[in-house]
Amino acid sequence: MLDLPQRFAQTDIALVGRPVDSGHNVAVSWSYAVLLFGAGVLGGLTGSIAGLASVATYPALLLAGLPPVTANVTNTVALVFSSVGSVWGSRPELAGQRELLTRILPFAAVGGVTGAALLLSTPAEGFEKLVPVLLAFAAVTILIPVRPTQSARVATHHRHVATMVLQGAAVFAVCIYGGYFGAAAGVLLLALFLRIGGAKLPRANASKNVVLGAANGIAALIFAVVAPVQWPAVAALGVGCLLGGRLGPLVVRHGPDKPIRIAIGVAGLALAVKLGVDAYR
């Protein structure tokens, strides 16, 4: 088996179309920088609202010329800025949720580490064929309505031990997926938190932003050390993600997000079909 630098160097192609050593970054043209910034704003906005940042940001990195694995690790690092913005904007809804978050954040961190390790140990060729499936799953997830129940409650009260274990296991599983690819991981977490307690969407969304941010942050630290992160792309995408992530909680707080979620879901399905055709033909 190749070590990580050798494997990435052999499978990755730069923006200019030539092989790249995993330790080198490739300059991003102004046109691609604008594209990545715009995708970052859209990704940060939709990610902090519906948990689908990667459906907007990951395709933009592919359009900029990054191969799937490099695009994925670069995307994970850039989405840390989305998490910063979304948590920043969710501060009013996070009041009173410390007990829940303190209990489940360790599960999220371990899940993020596990997902990152799985990505780095998966052959690039297999990942290219897996991406369309993950992306289609993300798009379908966002199109399926999540209906909070009146009995759902998020945080503040002690739960039965079995319920807490199940809750932690669910967060751990979702964050493995979040560390591995990430698209729609936020949607899965949002659905989970809507059913745990009686919180409305803004509070459940705030919990999701913190937990997903922890999982992404841990995975991003690993990728920054051992994976071929393209930092110029992170800079352009990250600034947009920070702005979009900051604005998202305001939208959740004051307006419906259904039209945006439907549009992103349909676009995600279309992209999944396109990537599937390219990967399997």
Image (tube, grey):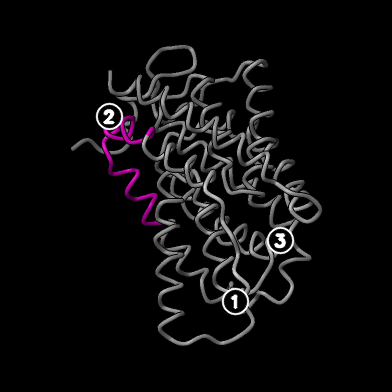
Is residue 207 shown in magenta?
Answer: no
User: Comparing marks 2 and 3, which lies closer to the viewer?
Assistant: 3
Q: Give the residue pinned by disc 2.
A: 125
Amino acid type at circle 3 is: Pro
Of callouts 3 and 1, which one flags the residue occurring earlier in the amino acid sequence?
1
Q: Which region of the structure is painted magenta?
A: 113-132
Which numbered disc flags the more N-terminal residue, 2 or 3? Answer: 2
- Residue 252 in the image: above or below residue 183: below
Whole-percent x, y for residue 98 in the image: 65, 76
Between circles 3 and 1, the one closer to the viewer is 1
Secondary element at tag 1: loop
Earlier sequence position, callout 2 versus callout 1: 2
Residue 78, image x, y percentages: 58, 40
Residue occupying image coordinates x 48% and y 35%: 229
Q: Secondary structure at mark 2?
A: helix
* Disc number placed over residue 33 in the picture, else none: none
Looking at the rendered structure, the number of numbered marks drawn on it comes to 3
Looking at the rendering, which quadrant does residue 162 occupy? bottom left
Mark 3 crowd level (few <14, some 14–19, many ≥20, 10 Å Cα): many
Residue, disc 3 = 202
Residue 67 in the image: above or below residue 111: above
Q: Are marks 2 and 1 in contact (CB under 8 Å)?
A: no
Residue occupying image coordinates x 26% and y 38%: 3
Q: CA distance from mark 2 to mark 1?
A: 45 Å
